[in-house]
Amino acid sequence: MAIEDSLWSGLIRELLDRSHLWRPEEVGGILDGAAAALGLRMTVHLVDHEQLALHPLPVPGRPAAGPLAIDGTDAGRAFALIETVTAGDRHWSPMVNGTDRIGVLEVEFPAGTPDPALVRACETVAGLVGHLITTTTPRGDHLHRIRRTGPMSPGAELLRQLLPPLTVSVTDFAVAAVLEPCYDVGGDAFDYAADGRRPQFVVLDAAGRRMRAGLAAAVVLSCVRSARRAGQDLLAQARAADEELLRQFPDARFATAVLAELDLDTGLLSYVNAGHPPPLVLRDGSIVETLTDGRRMPLGIEDPKASYGQVELRPGDRLLLYTDGVTEARDDSGEHFGIRRLAAVAEEHAGAGLPLPEALRRLAHTVLGYRTGPPADDLTLVLVEWSADAALRTVPPTSRADDQPR
């Protein structure tokens, strides 16, 4: 099956033109209507916050369809591996916003196997729809509801609005994050700045639960960002958080955190650890270092003697940041997940050849599967890989140049 280029151009033009004024609930129907002119049927599936299933956008006139599991389905494979999957008369293309995975585009062909040009055109449409979904989501609640399987607490609602995308890549490194539980986050948060030659990464855990912990985490995020954007170093960013936490919370609320900066020209990683679990460094699929230097008091408790920890990284290394909700997750017997088990699972997924965000998703679900009963604490993971190949594996196939490493 082949379709003239002019018809594809018409579909893209219609989507762009109508996207300026469409309502969030109209996206699925408008896309499918534009595709019908080409003899195709298209469905957008958005990933839920748990990253367990893909949920279809409703299309007027079609019966409601249920979610598709990420594990064990063609749609899930396209999402997980960020690759195109064709099975019979259906094609699945990964949908990203930049490099943040938000779902897949399903295309149903009338008959026969599509030719490569048609597949590539579908991938291009999926890329466009991914960006349009992202710009449309803030207009209302419909697309937020599609991605939720339960109500979100006010504290989680607050923090979700402050967090960056779960995955961001640039030419020479990639960073991915996971935060659980999705709908009742307390004080965990993360941040990063990918611009320049010295990217920075932050993971934090504010003491307490629910809204007050969320407010404390929001204060820390805001202080770190404000100081960073003013050109201040990691120690100054930490001091800014100290001052504001002391000012805003007379009950002496504090937060543990790791703030890190990687010099991409020299490989020097500088970090400050404010009472937080120590980061791990993976090299060639194995844990090679636990970063125990750079200690200072938790944020909110002034520490004038604070200093940097430093370690030299090599291209291809991974840096794993996490909160104590990971290592302190308990099974039925009360045994902690622990740092040794975390290291072993991180090594297992590092050697599986998965895209960085998928390796982290599986790592997080391993921890969640280990934990029994209601969560006693949030868990957050941030994984950084200094590698052009890692960055390239987070973009859809149409964006990977043929002469670059896969």
Image (spheres, grey):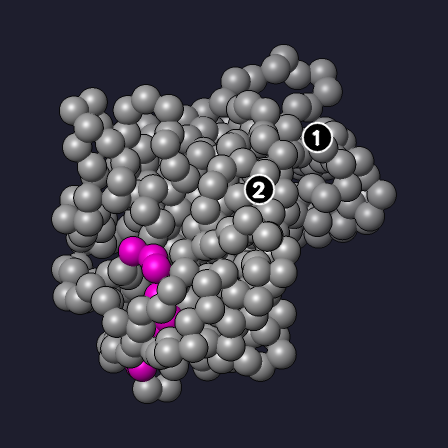
Q: Earlier in the sequence, mark 1 or mark 2?
A: 1
- Specify the farthest residue to the bottom: 266
Q: Secondary structure at mark 2?
A: helix
Element assignment for label 1: helix
Disc 1 from disc 2: Cα separation:
28 Å
Which residue: 32% across, 28% down?
72
Q: Is residue 129 above or below residue 305?
A: above
Whether residue 140 is visible: yes
**Which secondary structure is most common in the magenta stretch?**
strand
Which residue is more in the foreground, 356 or 227? 227
> Which residues fall within the magenta stretch?
267-277
Q: Which residue is mark 2?
A: 212
Contact (CB < 8 A) between labels 1 and 2? no
Residue at 34% in and 57% down: 276
Residue 272 lies within the magenta run = yes
Residue 93 belongs to magenta span: no
Total numbered circles: 2
Whether 205 is drawn above or below 89: the answer is below
**Residue 251, image x and y in percent?**
55, 49
What amino acid type is highlighted by mark number 2?
Arg
Q: Is 239 above or below relative to 66?
A: below
The residue identified by callout 1 is 142
Quarter of the picture holding the C terminus: bottom left
Q: Nearer the viewer, residue 107 or 188?
A: 188
Query: Which residue appears at 51% of the width and 51% of the height?
Result: 253
